[in-house]
Image (cartoon, rainbow, N blue to C red):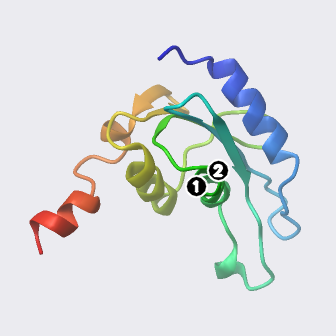
Amino acid sequence: MNIDWEDLRAHARVAMKKAYAPYSHFPVGVAGLVSDGRIVSGCNVENASYGLGLCAECGMISELIRSGGGQLVAVACVDQHGNALMPCGRCRQLLWEHGGPDCLIDATSGVLPMSEILPDAFGPEDLQTRN
């Protein structure tokens, strides 16, 4: 599948502008290309109880499931300036579950597969093989 990274980043920037970040003042947007060609996006949503805030990737995964599911192929996450932003550890796990080892991430050091970003990841298959 041919990935238009600039278009994906543009969708992430649009999502970032919807972020609710009154505490950190650090809006984040993310967009993902789904295997069926859809683009899903999300933004961070903070909460006065800081630990309850939601990362942009959480919103994107919710949108992925809400709009029909599927497998993520490529993901771009941006900060308020439109620069590439690495997903946090929690979000890397979400991306692994819904994109797998071959999902491409627009990382700060260039495009990388999830298998390099989260080596030796724990996934759904581990629940089956280790149960």
Distance, label 2 to label 1, CA atoms, is 10 Å
Specify few, some or many for label 1: CA neighbours under 10 Å numbering under 14, 14-19, or 20 or more. Answer: many
Name the residue carrying label 1: 61
Vertical arrangement, residue 62 with respect to residue 120, above or below: below
Vertical arrangement, residue 129 with respect to residue 19, above or below: below
Q: Is residue 32 visible?
A: yes
Vertical arrangement, residue 36 with respect to residue 67, above or below: above
Q: Quadrant of residue 115?
A: top left
Residue at 84% x, 70% y: name it. Answer: 23
**Residue 29 drawn at (x, y percent):** 73, 46
51 lies left or right of 124 = right
The label number, if any, that marks residue 95 in the structure image: none
Look at the image and tell me in which quarter the C terminus lies: bottom left
- In the displayed image of the protein, which residue is found farthest to the bottom? 49
User: Looking at numbered disc 2 in the image, what kind of residue is underneath it?
Assistant: Ser
Give the mark nearer the N terminus: 2 vs 1. Answer: 1
- In the displayed image of the protein, which residue is found farthest to the top? 2
User: Looking at numbered disc 1 in the image, what kind of residue is underneath it?
Assistant: Ile
Q: Quadrant of residue 63?
A: bottom right
Vertical arrangement, residue 18 with respect to residue 45, above or below: above
Front in this rendered view, residue 97 or 20: 97
Tags 2 and 1 touching, CB below 8 Å: no
The label number, if any, that marks residue 67 in the structure image: 2
Residue at 45% x, 53% y: name it. Answer: 92
Q: Quadrant of residue 24?
A: bottom right
Front in this rendered view, residue 110 or 114: 114
Task: Determine whether the residue tagged by mark 2 lies in a helix, strand or loop.
Answer: loop
**Residue 43 drawn at (x, y percent):** 74, 53
